[in-house]
Amino acid sequence: MATILGVDDHLPTRELMRALFQSQGHRVLLATNGPEAIALAGKERPDLVFADVVMPAMDGYALVGRLREQAGCKGVPVVLMSASLDEGRARALAAQCGATEYLVKPVEPAHLLATARRILANRENGAAAGHDPRR
């Protein structure tokens, strides 16, 4: 199974991600902010990242940019999540910074799992065709 990194300063959201993704057999890593996530991603090389946009120390948009610069993490899919009042602007910023997808909080657990399943399946299909999306 995959290694999924969940990044959120809200403990209940991190625990939800842990429970959901572990229930599907995935290895789950958790971080409370962007700098912690960058350090963890550099050591553990996740297959997928779910991150909140609004966090202390570094927002989700900056996190995506830093991951895109880090060797071994450049092509890792990042799903940004937020309860933004301006969804259109938030989606545009997510796309502009290189996020794979944007989800509006609160995210239904089934939608979170379906998103992870779809993105991971796309990565596997790319790897099977000889393309390594992390490079």
Image (cartoon, helix red, strand yellow):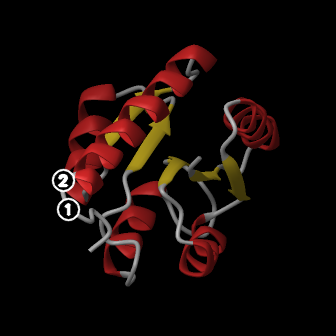
Residue 56, given in percent of the width and then of the height, sits at 63, 61
Q: Position of residue 125 (x, y in %)?
A: 27, 44
The residue located at (48%, 34%) in the rendering is 116
The quadrant holding residue 5 is bottom right
User: Tag 2, which secondary structure?
Assistant: loop
Q: Position of residue 21 (x, y in %)?
A: 67, 36
Residue 84 visible in the snapshot: no
Residue 107 makes an appearance in the image: yes
Q: Nearer the viewer, mark 1 or mark 2?
A: 2
Q: Which residue is mark 2?
A: 129
Along the line of sight, which residue is nearer the eye, 84 or 70?
70
Residue pointed to by mark 1? 131
Q: Amino acid at mark 2?
A: Ala
Q: Residues within 10 Å of mark 1 (few under 14, many from 20)?
A: few
Instruction: Answer above or below: position of 83 versus 68.
Output: above
Left or right side of 25 for 64? left
Question: In the displayed structure, would residue 42 be above or below residue 17?
Answer: below
